[in-house]
């Protein structure tokens, strides 16, 4: 009886060693097939984790450094998943234009799946008939030029309230937290546009909503181990990620159910008819109207409405206020730019107390300042795609279901595309045809192709209106003891690259 027991013990001890040895040899000397694939260059990678350890807290920066050594098209391995890293405008054009259809999917990731109704939104939905339907609803019904113009009064009112807050601090010579003010403004604008009223008023309810949205954005940009190393999925349960995602998904679902029910109730009180005045319709009104009328081929369900609304929040709040805080940070660091921008705004205002949206088209230097901000500080530094079939990119073989990250941050700082790429110089965009709409691949803050952001116009109008008014009404100084050279310009980690340190400045009222 002892010999079988000894053999069993020996086998139990030896099997893991043999398995690991075989795995390690296969990793060092991969088996070649008769059909040799030409793969993009790769940095050295480790068993199990691949190149995960090389990403760091700011992946867009780490990937730029790796691309400088291995080339603008690299193949990384993040756990079991191949990931193509794109760091040049030519390669980005190949992905997002030449082969846009093949790279029309988003990577399927657990966190976005759970938070965004299993892909019933627009941003994370797999490419296909459903995605085309809801994308069409967003472009034609929610974010058309006519619809965006219908919200002009709401935007101008919220900017006027922000100016009043700043004026109060200016009269007391107090510094203001611009990051906080910009975040509140963009959230208030989106609430009024999406829901028809603010949910961010003072009190416990407003504070809870802000916290809930903040946690939603943090989780959406998080890393889920099980997506890349499936047999380590238990880590996400142990570290609390699963529980956090489940909790915030349930909280937002309950909140959005209340919002939708309120709108349905209001519709019933009107006898079941839609809001006749186009300027009185918010996004939930429009989506309920689409649901009831069968616009775009077939009706959308309740989860689709909630998923689209969550996209509006995740795509229209953090990204917009991030651009504003980076733009003001650069303006504070460059007094020459601030003076030139103020001169333009003053010249167009011609003594008017307020800047309105009808003034914005004439402000070419303002638009250049925002473009230069987007070049240096794209709100989403890494744009994601996934291949649906095998394809050749720049002569390299790319397998189906390869994740792709286009490093918009690195492309915006590419010395082969830009003179003095690290310098903030808005003049480079004056009399330049380069724009942010996805046709110029050296500037990709909103993506391009089928998966490009449909809310570009809404975001740009908001950014321009806010900046024009706060440089028109106030001169700005850094707090005592802070110099332009000492400003902390570090990004925080996450899907949206906020400033790590909130932007604080001292306003001085300007005389007219």
Image (cartoon, rainbow, N blue to C red):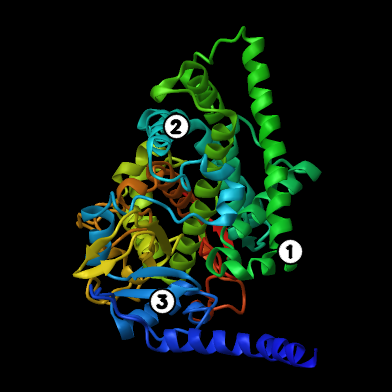
Contact, mark 1 vs mark 2 (Cβ under 8 Å): no
**Quadrant including the N terminus:** bottom right
Q: Nearer the viewer, mark 2 or mark 3?
A: 3
The part of the image, by quadrant, that contains residue 235 is bottom right
Q: Earlier in the sequence, mark 2 or mark 3?
A: 3
- Residue highlighted by disc 1: 240
Q: Which residue is mark 3?
A: 63
Provide the secondary structure element on which disc 3 rests. Answer: helix
Q: Write down the residue under mark 2.
A: 142
Q: Position of residue 56 (x, y in %)?
A: 53, 79
Q: Confirm whether residue 203 shows in the render.
A: no
Q: Is residue 427 above or below residue 166?
A: below
* Distance Cα–Cα, label 2 vs label 3: 36 Å
Other-residue count near label 1 (Cα within 10 Å), few / some / many at <14 / 14–19 / ≥20: few
Instruction: Judge whether residue 81 can be spotted in this image.
Output: yes
Instruction: Classify residue 224 as left or right of residue 172.
Output: left
Q: Residues within 10 Å of mark 3 (few under 14, many from 20)?
A: many
Query: Is tag 1's residue or tag 2's residue first in the polypeptide sequence?
Result: 2
Q: Residue at x 57, y 60 (%)?
A: 507
Q: Label 3, label 1: how many angstroms apart (C-alpha)?
A: 28 Å
The residue mark sitting in front, 3 or 1, is: 1
Question: On screen, 188 above or below 323?
Answer: above
- Name the secondary structure under disc 1: loop
Residues 273 and 125: in front is: 125
Question: Going by the image, does 102 lie left or right of 153?
Answer: left
Q: Residue at x 56, y 52 (%)?
A: 112
The residue that appears at 41% across and 71% down in the rendered structure is 334
Q: Could you say where residue 459 lies in the image, as x and y percent from the top left?
A: 44, 46
Residue 289 rendering spot, x and y as whole percentages: 51, 20
> Going by the picture, which residue comes out furthest to the front?
1
**Residue visible at 42% across and 64% down?**
382
Decide which of tag 3 and tag 1 comes sooner along the chain. Answer: 3
């Amino acid at each position: 009886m002892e010999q079988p027991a000894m053999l069993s013990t020996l086998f139990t001890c030896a099997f893991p060693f043999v398995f690991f040895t075989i795995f390690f040899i296969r990793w060092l000397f991969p088996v070649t097939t008769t059909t040799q694939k030409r793969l993009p260059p790769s940095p050295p990678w480790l068993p199990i984790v691949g190149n995960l350890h090389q990403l760091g807290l700011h992946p867009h920066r780490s990937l730029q450094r790796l691309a400088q050594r291995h080339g603008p098209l690299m193949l990384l391995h993040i756990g079991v998943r191949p990931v193509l890293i794109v760091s040049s405008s030519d390669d980005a054009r190949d992905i997002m234009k030449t082969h846009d259809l093949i790279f029309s999917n988003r990577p399927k990731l657990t966190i976005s799946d759970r938070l965004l109704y299993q892909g019933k939104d627009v941003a994370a939905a797999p490419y296909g008939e459903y995605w085309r339907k809801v994308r069409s609803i967003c472009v034609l019904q929610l974010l058309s030029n006519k619809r965006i113009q219908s919200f002009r009064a709401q935007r101008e009112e919220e900017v006027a309230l922000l100016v009043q807050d700043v004026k109060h601090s200016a009269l007391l010579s107090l510094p203001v937290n611009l990051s906080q003010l910009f975040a509140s403004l963009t959230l208030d604008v989106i609430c009024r546009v999406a829901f028809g009223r603010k949910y961010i008023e003072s009190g416990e309810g407003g504070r809870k909503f802000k916290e809930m949205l903040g946690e939603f954005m943090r989780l959406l940009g998080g890393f889920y181990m099980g997506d890349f190393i499936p047999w380590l999925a238990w880590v996400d349960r142990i570290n609390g990620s699963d529980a956090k995602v489940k909790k915030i998904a349930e909280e937002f679902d309950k909140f959005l159910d209340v919002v939708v029910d309120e709108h349905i109730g209001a519709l019933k009180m009107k006898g079941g008819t839609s809001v006749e005045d186009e300027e009185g319709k918010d996004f939930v009104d429009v989506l309920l109207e689409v649901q009831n009328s069968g616009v775009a081929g077939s009706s959308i369900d309740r989860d689709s409405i909630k998923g689209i609304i969550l996209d509006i929040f995740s795509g229209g709040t953090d990204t917009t206020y991030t651009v504003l805080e980076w733009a003001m940070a650069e303006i504070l660091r460059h007094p020459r730019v601030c003076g030139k921008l103020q001169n333009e705004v003053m010249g167009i205002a011609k003594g008017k107390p307020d800047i309105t949206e009808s003034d914005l088209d004439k402000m070419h230097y303002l638009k250049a300042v925002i473009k230069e901000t987007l070049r240096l500080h794209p709100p989403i530094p890494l744009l994601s795609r996934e291949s649906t079939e095998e394809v050749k990119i720049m002569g390299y073989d790319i397998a189906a279901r390869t994740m792709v990250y286009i490093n918009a941050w690195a492309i915006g700082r590419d010395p082969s595309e830009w003179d003095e790429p690290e310098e903030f110089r808005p003049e480079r965009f004056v009399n330049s045809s380069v724009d942010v709409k996805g046709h110029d691949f050296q500037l990709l803050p909103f993506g391009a192709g089928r998966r490009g952001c449909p809310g570009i116009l809404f975001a740009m109008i908001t950014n321009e209106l806010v900046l024009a008014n706060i440089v028109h009404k106030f001169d700005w100084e850094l707090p005592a003891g802070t110099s332009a050279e000492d400003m902390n310009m570090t990004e925080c980690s996450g899907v949206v690259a906020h400033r790590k340190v909130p932007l604080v400045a001292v306003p001085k009222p300007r005389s007219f």
